[in-house]
Image (cartoon, grey):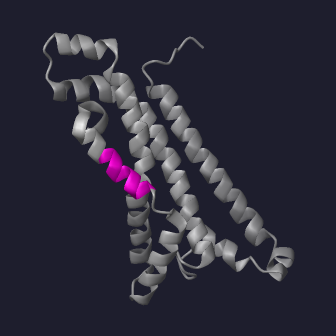
């Protein structure tokens, strides 16, 4: 909406995004999860709360990229031609602009998913995320963080770290592949 409509809508939505992006992520998450630790919550409820917080604080970067792509697509010749033919604005937005930016949106979603996964791992490592009975890469690494465990039980942190890195790379590769497959501007002459 911000990129397509412009004007006061664009100004208002981008100022709201700037307010959310000015909140420091990790200190806010640490404070919030420590406050939530006072409340009796199940591990699943705590995990859902972390996901909601990550979604609330993570949307501005996604909004900036989407807005920029909409601004570029809005100035394209096919949009100008559709406007000259009298096509409705909503049809232009959903039939002409959205299909041309969907690949960028999918790549950003996969990158955000991998970053959120790493943030949850960091919180669990620090003891603010998922707690011990529930398995998490963060609390697995936390249990192997002392010197005795790091030397004598090296497989506890080596394999956990390797799988976390491998999973993150796989998610990012899926996003890049989706972008290549869905991008209407890519050339298929390989």
Furthest-right residue in this view: 151
User: Residue 8's x, y, as percent?
Assistant: 23, 40
Above or below for 130 versus 71: below
Which residue is pictured at 38% across the width and 44% down the height?
63
Horizontally, residue 70 falls left or right of residue 9, namely: right
The image shows residue 109 at horizontal and vertical percentages of 45, 45
Image quadrant in which you'd find residue 126: bottom right
Percent position of residue 160, x then y: 69, 65
In the rendered image of this protein, does residue 152 appear above or below residue 122?
below
Q: Quadrant of the N terminus?
A: top left
Please indicate whether residue 104 sits to the left or right of residue 81 in the image. Answer: right
Q: Quadrant of residue 81?
A: top left
Quick check: can you spot residue 71? yes
Q: Judge from the rendering whether residue 32 lies leftward or rightward of residue 13; answer left or right.
A: right
Give percent across and percent down for residue 85.
Answer: 16, 10
For the point 80% across and 79% down, which residue is it? Answer: 149
16 drawn magenta? yes
How many numbered marks does the figure carry?
Answer: 0
Which of 135 and 90 lies nearest the eye of the viewer? Answer: 90
In which quadrant is the C terminus drawn?
Answer: top right
Q: Report the span colored magenta.
A: 13-21
90 falls in the magenta region: no
Of residues 90 and 8, the one drawn nearer to the viewer in this rendering: 8
């Amino acid at each position: 909406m911000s990129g397509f409509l412009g004007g006061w809508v664009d100004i208002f939505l981008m100022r709201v995004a700037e307010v959310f992006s000015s909140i420091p992520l990790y200190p806010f998450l640490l404070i919030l999860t420590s406050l939530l630790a006072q409340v009796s919550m199940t591990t699943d409820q705590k995990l859902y709360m972390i996901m909601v917080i990550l979604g609330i604080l993570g949307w501005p970067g996604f909004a900036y990229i989407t807005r920029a792509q909409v601004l570029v697509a809005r100035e394209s010749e096919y949009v100008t031609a559709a406007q000259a033919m009298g096509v409705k604005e909503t049809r232009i937005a959903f039939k002409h602009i959205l299909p041309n930016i969907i690949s960028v949106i999918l790549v950003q979603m996969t990158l955000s998913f991998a970053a959120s996964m790493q943030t949850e791992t960091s919180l669990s490592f620090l003891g603010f995320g998922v707690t011990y009975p529930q398995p998490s890469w963060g609390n697995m690494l936390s249990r192997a963080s002392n010197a005795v465990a790091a030397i004598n039980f090296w497989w506890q942190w080596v394999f956990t770290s390797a799988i976390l890195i491998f999973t993150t790379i796989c998610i990012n590769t899926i996003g890049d592949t989706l972008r290549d497959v869905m991008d209407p501007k890519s050339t298929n002459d390989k």
